[in-house]
């Protein structure tokens, strides 16, 4: 396992290169601004007249259409939604690539599952933060960074890894460390983590605990504070001090209750289901399902989004977040 830090990485490999960041959303806006603030020649490639076009202009970025940016750049860093990358790549990026260029990603999904294939002579690299775009920017401005992953699928120029690492350093990732991996490993672990813990698992855990308390007659506001709001404070302790550090900071009562009951909540059945979800990812079954969902116009995602907005915890939580100024 190789982890790269600031002092391990030279910037001169990309000092005079033009870097097109395609997309200006969660990751695009954060990474483009971080790299520009690090002194790199960044072009933002987005749809003309769209929200991102206007936002990038307001941020003072050098903005072009995706086609012009791809033609102009030496490195094309693709930060648009995974499910549309292949179409945009085929229509607006690939025709403008030349030998010695690099295409770069922050998730291995489209390369790993074969939706995007680079032409001969073009590097294929990944520099991926292990965190949301807003934190990529916030930690950079605070002088720190989000840990990153670096991978090289195709090294056509012999310096593809140096290029990806320099981009990661310019984004601030090397302050926290950049771990070397592969497109396969990043893709499979990222999908697994977001489905079973970070986004899927944790919201289902919170929702179920909240509903259990409310159905038992407790005040919904108290249930929200207990099962959702306070979770950040506990996770911050784990983030900074690990499990043992967190246990040291909570009461002995919480420690005894938590350690004796947690395996009744996350059971061996849960572990078996996690293994099944990982297998679906490894076999490409999730990717196929997501591709079909998009081809059908996202009926399931639209319905699930509607149900999510309508959840009691969302209504109670929004009211409380507004009252304490967290939410506008
Ligand atoms: N979100 C995150 O925190 C993380 C994301 N990643 C990865 O980063 C990559 C980007 O993800 P993320 O930042 O969330 O993406 P977003 O959903 O935030 O991307 C939005 C951007 O994509 C553009 N866009 C959307 N649809 C199209 C289209 N059909 N044609 C052209 N441009 C389009 C939008 O432009 P417009 O304004 O014109 O609509 C906007 O600039 C993905 O590979 C993702 O897996 C990796 C780690 C974390
Ligand atoms: C923020 C992040 O790392 C995720 C959950 O993998 C994503 O947004 O795809
Ligand atoms: Mg992730
Ligand atoms: Mg992800």
Image (cartoon, rainbow, N blue to C red):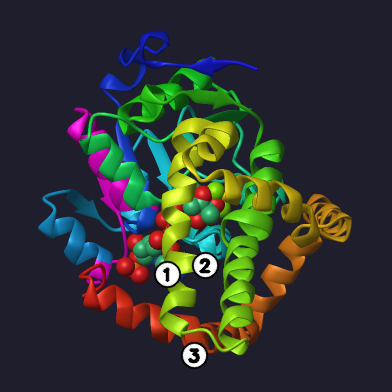
**Is label 2's Cβ within 8 Å of ligand 2?**
no
Total marks in image: 3
Image coordinates for residue 303, horizontal then vertical, percent: 59, 89
Q: Is residue 70 visible to us here?
A: yes
Is label 2 or label 3 in front? 2
Write the residue at 57% across / 68% down: 206
**Which disc is residue 310 wearing?**
3
Residue 33 position by quadrant: top left
Q: Is residue 1 left or right of residue 44?
A: right
Within the magenta stretch, is there residue 128? no
The residue sitting at 37% across, 50% down in the picture is 133
**Residue 174, position as x, y percentages in the image:** 40, 23
Q: Mark 1 or mark 3, which has the lower sequence index?
A: 1
- Residue 3 % position (x, y): 54, 18
| Closer to the camera in the image, 141 or 23 | 141
Looking at the image, which residue sits at the far front? 253
Residue 94 as seen in the image, left or right of residue 269? left
Q: Residue placed at 85% from the left, 52% from the top?
A: 275
User: Could you tell which of marks 2 and 3 lies nearer the N-terminus?
Assistant: 2
Query: Quick one: label 1, few (<14), some, or many (20+) residues within 10 Å?
Result: some
**Element at label 2:** helix
Q: What label sits on residue 79 in the rendered view?
A: none
Question: What residue would you read off at disc 2?
Answer: 227
Give the CA distance from mark 2 to mark 3: 18 Å
| Range covered by the magenta-colored residues | 27-51
Q: Secondary structure at mark 1?
A: helix
**Mark-to-mark CA distance, 1 and 2:** 6 Å
* Residue 92 appears in the rendering: no
The crowd level at tag 2 (other Cα within 10 Å; few <14, some 14-19, many 20+) is: some
In the image, is residue 28 above or below residue 122? below
Checking the image for residue 225, the label placed there is 1
């Amino acid at each position: 396992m190789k982890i790269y830090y600031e002092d391990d990485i030279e910037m001169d490999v990309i000092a005079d290169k033009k870097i097109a960041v395609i997309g200006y959303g969660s990751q695009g806006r954060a990474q483009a601004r971080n790299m520009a603030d690090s002194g790199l020649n960044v072009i933002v490639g987005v749809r003309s007249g769209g929200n991102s076009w206007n936002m990038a202009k307001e941020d003072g970025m050098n903005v072009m259409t995706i086609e012009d940016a791809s033609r102009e750049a030496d490195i094309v860093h693709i930060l648009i939604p995974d499910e549309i990358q292949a179409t945009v790549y085929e229509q607006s990026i690939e025709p403008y690539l030349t030998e010695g260029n690099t295409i770069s990603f922050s998730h291995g999904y489209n390369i790993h599952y074969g939706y995007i294939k680079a032409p001969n002579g073009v590097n294929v690299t990944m520099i991926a933060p292990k965190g949301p775009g807003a934190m990529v920017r916030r930690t950079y401005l605070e002088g720190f960074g989000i840990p990153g992953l670096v991978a090289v699928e195709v090294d056509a120029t012999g310096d593809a890894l140096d290029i990806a690492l320099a981009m990661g350093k310019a984004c601030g990732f090397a302050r926290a460390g950049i771990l070397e991996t592969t497109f396969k490993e990043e893709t499979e672990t990222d999908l697994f983590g977001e489905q079973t813990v970070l986004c899927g698992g944790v919201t289902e855990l919170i929702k179920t605990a909240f509903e259990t308390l409310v159905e038992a007659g407790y005040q919904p506001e108290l249930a929200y504070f207990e099962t959702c709001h306070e979770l950040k404070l506990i996770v911050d302790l784990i983030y900074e001090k690990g499990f043992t550090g967190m246990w040291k900071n909570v009461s002995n009562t919480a420690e005894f209750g938590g350690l004796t009951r947690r395996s009744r909540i996350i059971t061996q059945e849960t572990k078996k289901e996690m293994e099944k979800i990982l297998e679906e990812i490894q076999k490409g079954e999730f990717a196929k399902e997501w591709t079909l969902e998009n081809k059908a116009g996202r009926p399931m995602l639209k319905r699930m989004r509607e149900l999510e907005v309508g959840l009691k915890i969302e209504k109670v939580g929004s009211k409380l977040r507004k009252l304490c100024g967290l939410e506008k």
